[in-house]
Amino acid sequence: MKFALSILMILTAPIFAFGQMTNALRKPVSIEIDGYAAKVNNRVITIGEVNDALTPLLPELYRQFKGDQLKEELDKAFDKARDQLIERALIMEAFTAKGGQIPDQYVNENIKSEINQRYKGDEALFEQMLAQQKKTRAEYMENVREQMAVGMLTNEEVGRRARVTPEQVREAYEQNREMYYIPEKVKYSIIVLNKGTTPDDQAVKREEADTIRRRLLDGADFGETATEVSEGSRAADGGAFPWMQPKDVRPELQDTLRTLPAGEISEIIETEQQLYIVKVEARRQPGYKTFDEVRLDLKNALTAKERQRLHERWIDRLKENSYIQIYD
């Protein structure tokens, strides 16, 4: 991680007072020295600016990574933040070259809106945030002005030009149709009884299972019955399971879940240790999502991809006409 350098100077000086000489050591003084991270034409991007941009990401990085991997991820994040600041500087120069301006009125309105949303209209909390970041209000205004300018020009050069035709959306659907395949799924509930270890216990459990099944066939609510009598892990949920593919459930239930009509009660399914009674709540047949179901999501994805392509091409053009120096 490229952090700002610091130098510790310990100075010792003699102190003379009223003709008597005493010696004392001055306290250590920590002096922060910022450095260059990059230069875009005449604009310098400092290491401090990059570190400020990194600050919101640090808690998550420190949570996910440790040791050498953490250092590697911090370096990657630093490089990415530096690249973003370089792009921002390039866009600002293009904005200025076009004669663009953001009046103070609009900047102040933006800041006022932020105070209302993030600080519930409390100016004191906002000023406290500025103090913590060691920024003046004027500096913050310039930062907001730059954000607005970058957003405006990016929308003009990229957002408004990103177009996707209906034909392109349809073609993408046909070419990637397998992505929209929906496998067979069932939603089911289950009552589980543990058989016991002795023949007598097992006979009692089978009789209990028969009695429960007859109650269900006579119209008893499956969920309430499962909550009352099931010994399975989902008894508290009425024995209910979410939508699942039959192939993903326990093997002894797969055939039943593939063939049992929705709404019906299964026969008693017996294994070495347990007895099951199953109800298929609903069934989804395999098939493909229709074009109309995925059209909007597909269009949004294609538009985002087109925006990215236009953005990269635009930034490349700006870089070709600029002097950029990276400092490692």
Image (cartoon, grey):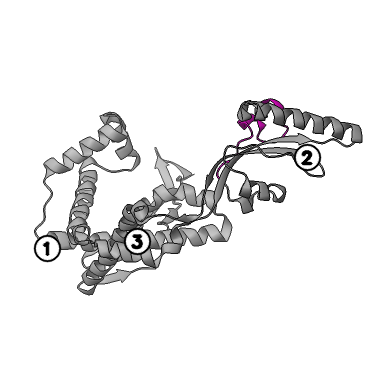
Q: Which residue is more in the foreground, 2 or 154? A: 154
Q: Is residue 143 left or right of residue 221?
A: left
Q: Mark 2, mark 1: which one is toward the viewer?
A: 2
Q: What kind of element bears circle 2? A: strand
Residue 293 visible in this rendered orientation of the protein: yes
Prevailing secondary structure class for the magenta stretch in the rendered image: loop
Q: What kind of element bears circle 3? A: helix
**Between discs 3 and 1, the one toward the N terminus:** 3
Residue reaching furthest to the bottom = 320
Give the residue at mark 3: 82
| Residue beneath the point at 41% across and 65% down | 176
Q: Which amino acid type is shown beneath numbered disc 2?
A: Gln
Q: CA distance from mark 3 to mark 2?
A: 61 Å
Q: Which residue is more in the foreground, 260 or 54? A: 260
Give the residue at mark 2: 274
The quadrant of the picture occupied by the C terminus is bottom left
Label 3: few (<14), some or many (≥20) within 10 Å? many
**Quadrant in the picture for residue 51:** bottom left
Q: Mark 3, mark 2: which one is toward the viewer?
A: 2
**Between discs 2 and 1, the one toward the N terminus:** 1
Range shown magenta: 228-243
Q: Which amino acid type is shown beneath numbered disc 1?
A: Ala
Q: What kind of element bears circle 1? A: helix
Q: Determine if the magenta segment contains residue 233.
A: yes
Give the residue at mark 1: 97
Q: Is residue 154 above or below residue 59?
A: below
Residue 1 visible in this rendered orientation of the protein: no
Q: CA distance from mark 2 to mark 1?
A: 77 Å
Q: Which amino acid type is shown beneath numbered disc 3?
A: Arg
